[in-house]
Amino acid sequence: MNSVVTDVAQERRVVTEIPGPNSQALHARRQKVVSAGVAATFPIYIDHAKGAILVDVDGNQYIDMGGGIGVVTIGHVDDAVIDAAMAQAHKVTHTLFTVAGYESYVRLCELLAQHTPGDFEKKSVLVNSGAEAVENAVKIARKFTGRTGVGVLDHGYHGRTNLTMAMNFKAMPYKLGFGPFAGDIHHAPNSYPFHDKLSGAEAAARTISYFEKKVGATDLACLVVEPIQGEGGFVVPADGYLPALQKWCNDNGIVYVSDEVQSGIMRTGHYYASEFFGVVPDLVTTAKGVAAGFPIAAVTGRADIMDASHAGGLGGTFGGNPMAAAAAVQVFEEIEKRDLLGEAKRIEKTLKGALVNLQKKYPTIGDIRGKGAMLAIEFTEPGTDTPISDIVPKITAYAIQKGVLLLSAGTYGNVLRFLPSVITSDELILDAVAVIDEALSSI
Ligand SMILES: *Cc1c(COP(=O)(O)O)cnc(C)c1O
């Protein structure tokens, strides 16, 4: 198999002003034809990428500390994954699986059954996006239970379709002006130890009490929970919180859905973050990191629940595309072959260590949290938990000028989140943190 671009030096390199002239020209073209509703966080345009590095159309190189928003967990343009997808592309690119099947779909479902938490019989459906996976999990849970209510948590994020908009916490930018929204969605407080100071048991009692008072457990089809909240700011719940929610769901016939679209697939140093918390969900959603950028997503879970739908109730034209499925199968193989779970743990050690040192210099770093290659820092007024929301945009704007792409998160926009590919070297991680240090000292 011949790759067009094979080598990109794994280093940042700034050779023009940013954005450079070619990016500026593309941005001008974009503004005429691309909807303004599609955000442009940075007006840079990428020509190619490799490993941890993005190369723009002016030849500037960026350390991608966002990993394509947690998608290229295995690294940009991984040779083995690209070769697997290309080999599939030369054989068949589409049939519609519900009309005529192919192996990569079945193989991916076997791997999902093997690597999602729980040692019971499992089945999957493959779809195109994280939001679509969440939608399908809700559909399946409703059909299985004969109930309609959906429980979700404050600061959660589940997508941009009509149902998932209603499940999100944040109005801006996800909901404002886009209603009416789907009904029977019920929000309750989450566990957010840095702010609520509650133990896992206390936070779970509060969440459960909300649902019992506002909805009634017997009206809930499912509870949809991100084990570590993504867009909400990498909120890691207090110990015991998720197991308590799971037990309450089990005791009350509520399907426990773990939305692992962001936290799944080696991100936290485990295949799924639920494992870290000792939780065995009934259903799991998978998307972002599973196929290194090829669009594919899944709902996986207990076979009896997954079989609740009548034939034809689940699916879609492009669901489980052969190339995307082949890429995902290869991602699973590479995780095993190259101990990528271990690499995620290495990132945690290096990055957390560097962030702890940074916190000693800058008391506005109120909290450092996360697991594996899913880490974040939250900026607050020193010694308090009052958010400072103008620091993070200044850091990300400074860093992009220096060749480091950083992402923000959090309900108050005061969280800097790190989602580097697990193959990012320690050297690059420390270099990126050095740029954050420079940014903070210049603010
Ligand atoms: C990104 C995300 C989604 C939505 O996925 P899309 O592929 O963008 O539709 C859903 N849930 C979580 C936890 C996410 O991080």
Image: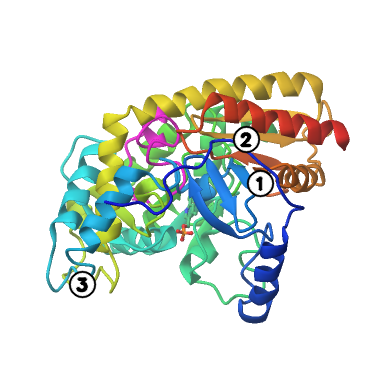
Q: Tell me where residue 206 sits by quadrant.
A: top right
Q: Residue visible at 50% across and 61% down?
A: 159
Residue type, label 1: Gly
Kindly report the distance in space between the C-alpha atoms of the residues bearing marks 1 and 2.
Answer: 10 Å
The residue nearer to you, when weighing 393 against 368, is 393
Question: Quick one: SS at disc 3?
Answer: loop
Q: Residues within 10 Å of mark 2 (few under 14, many from 20)?
A: many
* Rendered location of residue 440, percent (x, y): 81, 33
Q: Main secondary structure of the magenta part?
A: loop
**Labelled pair 1, 2 in contact (Cβ < 8 Å):** yes
The tag earlier along the polypeptide, 2 or 3, is: 3
Label 3 belongs to which residue? 96
Locate residue 1 relative to residue 390 in the image: left or right.
left
Label 1 belongs to which residue? 410
Question: Quick one: SS at disc 1?
Answer: loop
The tag earlier along the polypeptide, 1 or 2, is: 2
Which of discs 1 and 3 lies nearer the camera? The answer is 3
Residue type, label 3: Leu
Kindly report the distance in space between the C-alpha atoms of the residues bearing marks 2 and 3.
Answer: 40 Å
Question: Any magenta on residue 137?
Answer: no
Which quadrant: the C terminus?
top right
Locate residue 305 relative to residue 400 in the image: left or right.
left
Q: Tell me where residue 62 sits by quadrant.
A: top right
- Asked if residue 305 can be seen in this view, the reply is yes
Q: Which residues are magenta?
A: 261-286
* Rendered location of residue 212, percent (x, y): 48, 49
**Labelled pair 2, 3 in contact (Cβ < 8 Å):** no
Label 2 belongs to which residue? 376
Residue type, label 2: Ala
